[in-house]
Image: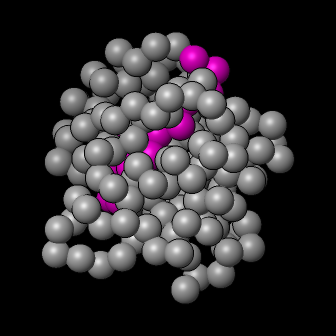
Amino acid sequence: MKLYFLRHAEALDGADDAARPLTSHGEKQAREVGRFLERAGIEFDAVYCSPLVRAKQTAEGVLKICGSADLQIAEAFLNETSQAQFDKWLKEIPEVKHACLVGHAPSLGERICQLLAMTNPEALKLPKGGLACLETEDRHSAVLKFFVTPRLLGVKTS
């Protein structure tokens, strides 16, 4: 199973954190990640994302280009979710070939580090719109297949 950890793209500032939408630059970041995945021939069988607006908009932007899977909201991607709760959730999702997981910093990077058995949870910093592909057989450990940032895809920082 390949897990594609995608941090939400750039969002507007705002008092209501859960309702912050993507900026136009963030929308471009999501599109470019989608185009990259489309060129790589990757189509998601499952897409899970945080309930926060910016994560949903990022997932939808990517799905418009490279997927037909239904978007499923998962509280497992909120930063308040413990590692144990996330591990339990990950074990319970159906087995698929390609699953996209859209969430937030710092927890998304921490989840990646945990699966890669990296002892420093800050060793991998996922930028906004960043994507890490991990391959796992047991959902307890994984191998990093690739790591892509919007900048590598030609989207300059705003």
Does the magenta-highlighted stretch encompass residue 10?
Answer: no
Quarter of the image for residue 25 reads: bottom right
Q: Tell me: residue 136, above or below residue 3.
A: above
The quadrant the N terminus occupies is top right
Would you say residue 100 sits in the magenta stretch? Answer: yes
| Residue 117 can be seen, yes or no | no
Q: Position of residue 115 (x, y in %)?
A: 45, 35
Q: Is residue 133 left or right of residue 123?
A: right
Residue 4: x %, y % from top left: 56, 40
Rendered residue at 43%/68% (across/down): 22
* Residue 16 visible from this viewpoint: yes
| Residues rendered magenta in the picture | 96-111
Name the foreground residue: 144 vs 7.
7
Q: Nearer the viewer, residue 42 or 111?
A: 42
Q: In the rendered view, tell whether residue 58 sits above or below residue 38.
A: below
The residue at the far bottom in this view is 158
Residue 10, percent across and down? Answer: 46, 71
